[in-house]
Image: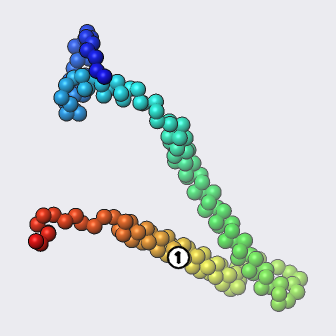
Amino acid sequence: MKRRKEFLLNESTINVLKQYQDERHLQTMTEALSEIVDEHKHRNDIDTTEIVVKEIAKQVAEKLSNALTRIRLGTNNADRNSDIILMLLNTLLSYQPLSTLITEETPQFTKARQIEKDRIAHFRQKKIDKEKKKAERAKKEKQRSAPGPLLTDNDVIL
């Protein structure tokens, strides 16, 4: 129910109301004032905690991305090296008892390093292929769920 009230507003407030009215293509300044009041009433209805947490997480991830990338690369390198060492030790210890260790890079070490690189590349390619297939399936599903073209009067044959 609407009731009539009279307000005294300064010129700058009236200008703001007129500008709001023009931007929103409203009929009267009363509508503009009502919308502004409604927006003011509902501005706290949004749960800002979740938004703030997401924004903080995004900023922290940005700040730490270089350090995390370096840690990830270092970890991958250490993992790769330990796999190479395990393969070499496994091979050497299974064939003969050793009394000394070789310190220079041997053909076996080079081969083990290449095997590990190939293995990592293989698993990486499998991961990329899997992600590509998943994206294609999602795209096809999206296309299936999208409505078909609408018929116009010109398309209908009577």
Is 12 drawn above or below residue 79 in the view shown?
above
> Residue 128 appears at what percent x and percent y?
50, 72
Is 3 drawn above or below residue 61 in the view shown?
above
Which residue is drawn at the image coordinates 28% and 21% (left, top)? 2
Is 94 drawn above or below residue 133 in the view shown?
below
Relative to the observer, which residue lies in front, 47 or 70?
A: 47
Image side of residue 75 versus residue 91, left or right:
left
Residue 136: tell me if it is visible. Answer: yes
Query: Which residue was labeled with disc 1?
Result: 125
How many marks the image carries: the answer is 1
Relative to the observer, which residue lies in front, 126 or 43?
A: 43
Query: To which quarter of the image does residue 5 belong?
Result: top left
Which residue is drawn at the image coordinates 71% and 74% (left, top)? 83
Q: In which quarter of the image is the C terminus?
A: bottom left
> Residue 16 appears at what percent x and percent y?
25, 22
Which residue is drawn at the image coordinates 82% and 90% (left, top)? 95
Query: To which quarter of the image does residue 72 belong?
Result: bottom right
Residue 132: tell me if it is visible. Answer: no
Q: Quadrant of the N terminus?
A: top left
Image side of residue 1 versus residue 80, left or right:
left
Query: To which quarter of the image does residue 122 belong?
Result: bottom right
Q: Is mark 1 on a helix, strand or loop?
A: helix
Relative to the observer, which residue lies in front, 122 or 114?
A: 122
The kind of residue tagged 1 is Gln
Which residue is drawn at the image coordinates 55% and 51% (left, top)? 65
Image side of residue 28 versus residue 122, left or right:
left
Label 1 Cα crowd, 10 Å radius (few <14 / some 14-19 / many 20+): few
